[in-house]
Amino acid sequence: MFGWFEKQIDPFAPFDETQTPPKSVSGFAWYYLRPIRHWFLLLFVIALVVGLFEASLYILIGWIVDLLTRSAPDRIWAEHGNALLLVGALVLFVRPILHFLHGLVSNQLIVPQSTNMIRWRTHVYTLGHSVSYFQADFAGRLANRIMQAGGAIRSIAVTLLDTLLYVAIFAFTALGVFSSVSPWLALPMGLWIACYVVLLYFFVPRAKERSLKVADTRSALVGRVVDSYTNILTVKLFARAAEERSAVSESLAANTHAFLDSMRLNTGVGGLLAFMNSALLVATGGLSIVLWRQGLMTTGETATGLSLVMRILAMSGWVMHTVRDVFENIGVVQESMETIARPHGLVDAPSAPGLEVTQGEVRFENVSFHYGREEGIIEGLDLTIRAGEKVGLVGTSGAGKTTITSLLLRLHDLESGRILIDGQDIAGVSQDSLRASIAMVTQDTSLLHRSIRDNILYGRPGARQREVEQAARLAHAHDFIMQLEDHRGRRGYDAHVGERGVKLSGGQRQRIAIARVILKDAPILVLDEATSALDSEVEGAIQESLSTLMEGKTVIAIAHRLSTIAALDRLVVIDRGRIVEEGSHRELLARGGLYARLWRRQSGGFLGADETAAN
């Protein structure tokens, strides 16, 4: 039984991963709840039946009281035994079945699966954002908003359909019972309901505003803490623990202030509600006694009315807190929505085909890109890299070399011009197929907090262990991998590397990244300072492996140490986003231009940023 209910919602069911969610709280919530709306309808029906059944128990209390007052003790079973047995059977069997069914639908069917379905869909949509989206925010804050959105949306829906419906049934049942006795008796309950609605009208918008501030300051606090932990090595190296504590304490103080501001509202509203509840109890009790003395109200009706009032009073504070939680969750949803519900910056063209690399020719045609500025970075770039050609990009820091490779991978859209691979405009093919055809090793290598094997397999999932080990050997990584052991005793290729690979040295991370690229074996290879973190001995050994890897591939290599790329087929010198020279190492030296000056001025193999000014 449990299994059937637990399988009715598939958190990973297919959906349109490119559709931007709505930017209103109700639209955003409904967007994620709509696929399972029929299960929420079922929960609503069951909650309605349960609420009506529970409210009817108080009417039964009045009936039993009147029955006892009217009947002789020795005749009650003879005259009313069947009715009493039926009531007992309903309470003993029907009530537990209804509650059990409600629990099945709520706990086994809706709560876990809907929460994780929303988390999955928001996560997948967020993954579709461009690199610049992630660079502009804290990773911890993004993850926090993904995690909290699922629980908040589900909590709002379940509370509105279940909890508040249940309370409304009790309130209007009491109003109906009182009205059937006397309009005067219904008057206090009607006034209480009206005052309660006014109180909610006052409370809700203020609670929403303050809850949003609490959620926002909490996310900022989480982001600040995660940022400190992620960059703990920098914090330690620069002895900035005091500054980090100060920054976190400021975020914590802001969250505390927002939290206290929210609690002030709750305390004030709670005191006012307590007075309203006491007034309702006194008014209902007093009127019940007056009507009973006049013979207008039976003892059982008095018992029913006072029992319902006591039940409503017991629930009223809980309802207020529940409503507060609803609007606190609305604040959470609004905060998450503002982060998640943004259009993707980079999207595939409709029905974009996959890239088919037959030769590997890369051509930049009049390409310009300024990172949103009016000028600078890349300007009118024309560059053709023939199939199988090995080209080195040379230039000082900031000349635009890495930007060129980023544009080739379509991490940004061009502002003008186009980039072609084997005659196919990369803007018209799917991003996944484009990046699957290009292997890249960057200077700033970060690894996933997983095993060594998983990190290398990222290049080609499904590769065999012997292929993983062969790639590691070619990258001169196998020997040190076999000596690794993590804090849980996992060794070799099973050892985990820590967040961003912090348990490894820079050179070890670089070699793992090179092994990953070797395993990927893509037709186009991009090396952006691929050996910058290696010592000279290891670099020399890996250069041999890279030479083998580059055979038959189109290669674009960037290196500040010019000796590592001097033997390539062609060198292209970039200055301020433009090509100023190109040719072989020997040709460029003979020309005596910028490349020759860079070569002469190198000390230890690196370029100085002031070379731009020397041009």
Image (cartoon, helix red, strand yellow):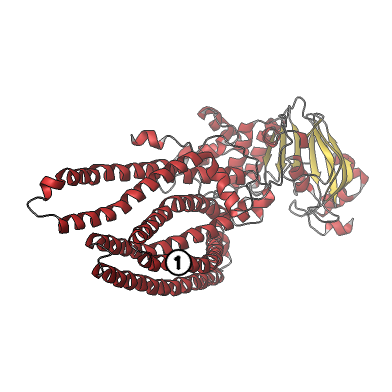
Residue at the top extreme, as displayed = 358
Q: Among all residues in the image, which is located at the extreme right? A: 591
Residue in the foreground of this view, choosing between 275 and 461: 275
Q: Is residue 519 above or below residue 67?
A: above
| Residue 178 visible in the snapshot | yes
Residue 438 locus on image (x, y percent): 70, 35
351, 539: nearer the viewer: 351
Name the amino acid, label 1: Tyr
Percent of width and height locating residue 58: 28, 56
Q: Is residue 420 left or right of residue 14?
A: right
Residue receiving disc 1: 196
Total marks shown come to 1
| Residue at 42% over, 74% down | 272
Tell me where residue 201 appears, x and y as whole percent: 52, 66
Query: Within the image, what quadrant is residue 142 found in?
Result: bottom right
Image quarter where the C terminus lies is bottom right
Q: Is residue 171 above or below residue 564?
A: below
Question: Quadrant location of the N terminus?
Answer: top left
Say left or right for 119 vs 604.
left
Q: Residues within 10 Å of mark 1 (few under 14, many from 20)?
A: some
Asked where in the image residue 435 lies, by quadrant, the reply is top right
| Residue 558 visible, this orientation | no
> Could you say which is closer to the camera, residue 588 or residue 120?
120
Instruction: Kindly state the secondary structure of the residue where label 1 is placed.
Output: helix
Question: Where does residue 394 sit, x and y in percent of width and height?
Answer: 81, 46
- Residue visible at 34% across and 47% down? 50
Report the front residue among 195 and 595.
195
